[in-house]
Amino acid sequence: MSAAWIVFAKELRDALRDRRTLLMVVLSSVAIGPVILFALSALISGMEERADSREIWAVGMEHAPTLRNYLERQTLVVKAAPADYERQLIDRRFGDAVMVLPSSFEAELAAGDRPTIELVSSSANNRAAGSLRRLQRVLGGFNQEVALLRLTHRGVAPAVLDVVRSQERDLADPRARSAQLTGMLPFFVLMAVLYGALHAALDTTAGERERGSLEPLLMTPPSRHALVWGKWGAVACVGMLIAVLSCSSFLPAQWLLRSETLAAMFQYGVREAGLFLALLMPLAGMLSALMMAVAIRCKTFKEAQANNTLVILAVSLLPLVSLFNQEGEQAWHLWTPALAQVTLMVRVLKGEAFSAPDLLLPLAVAAIVTVACLAYVSRQLKSAALR
């Protein structure tokens, strides 16, 4: 252990020596929380502002004084749409759906017919798609009002239209609803840990082989196992440092939330940060060992970087399983590295409790993979003679 500690100190000093790369990784991990939460809150704030907007854009509203009267009684402001609104909607330069009324609207309405109102939008324009639903609700209210007036005029009770009354009851608590928006945070934290340990894992294996410093290191008294454990400890330490910085960055980042709704629902404190770290620390050690196992067979840093692309791709794609899986969480999710951590971190954001076995299962899988990868690295050092 003393020899492994010496190697650990040497490798950690080498990892911290490249200050430019380390500074970039550290700054990115610290900035990930404020940047993501600020962007998310800006998005939610914009959606709330558009939902509260009292403006209706229309073409031919002069042909529908009855509809205009209804809209103004609803405190809505009717504005004329731009002449080239269709092109602007396609180009996403205009973010509101447009109501187009025919010239015969008032005559058809007075005759008891059903005039056709065209709602122009673009499904590729997210802002316009949101305002389209608002226009549909407004026209639904107008239809209901006109129908009730017609029934009353003919002596029919309006209650005949309401055969059944429905009442919604949402079982999700505020934290579970906020997790639908903040569920991407665990993914970004996971990727920060992965990229934080990547450079150190490649440099301590393929990098030393390319520089020619690994052969002299193997001729020193420490055993191969001590060398491997010392190198892995340094790489894992860097990855765990990134995990601490990334998880801690969300604590002060909550001051930047512009949306009051998101600020009220998003509850991330010291307890949540601690649970995140309990899940990410073993994963950081596992990813460090896995990337070292891939890189130890490579002769150059670039070759190791290219081979570890498969690891990065797998780690980035596994959490997406929970997005495409509409049947809810499955038992095998907790057996899959990266996916298990993201699944449990989403549980933390939702405020759901999980038992000790749920936490110990990913820890055991990470420990097994770590030991297997380190044994492979040690065997490679023994048998390769560094050809």
Image (cartoon, rainbow, N blue to C red):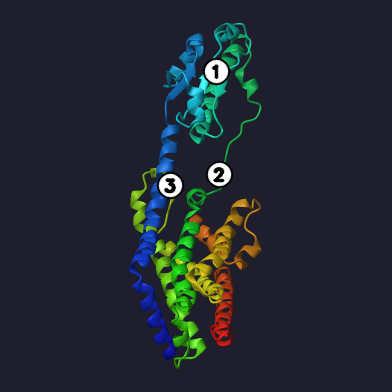
Q: Give the x, y percent position of residue 219.
A: 46, 91
Where, by quadrant of the figure, is residue 82 drawn? top left
| Up-down relation of residue 41 to residue 106 (above or below) | below
Q: Nearer the viewer, mark 3 or mark 1?
A: 3
Q: Amino acid at mark 1?
A: Glu
**Residue 114: in sight, yes or no?**
yes
Q: CA distance from mark 3 to mark 1?
A: 38 Å
Q: Give the x, y percent position of residue 28.
A: 39, 59
Sequence-wise, the earlier of marks 2 and 3 is 3
Residue at image mark 2: 170
Query: Regarding mark 3 in the picture, which secondary structure is present there?
Result: helix
Residue at screen point 45% across, 93% down:
221
Where, by quadrant of the figure, is residue 237 drawn? bottom left
Q: Amino acid at mark 3?
A: Leu
Question: Which residue occupies the extreme bottom position in the image?
Answer: 221
Query: Regarding mark 1 in the picture, which secondary structure is present there?
Result: helix
In front: 349, or 94? Answer: 94
Q: Residues within 10 Å of mark 3 (few under 14, many from 20)?
A: some
Sequence-wise, the earlier of marks 1 and 2 is 1
Q: Nearer the viewer, mark 2 or mark 3?
A: 3
Residue at image mark 1: 145
Q: CA distance from mark 2 to mark 3?
A: 23 Å
Q: Are marks 2 and 3 in contact (CB under 8 Å)?
A: no
Residue at screen point 48% across, 83% down:
229
Residue at image mark 3: 40
Q: Give the x, y percent position of residue 337.
A: 58, 67
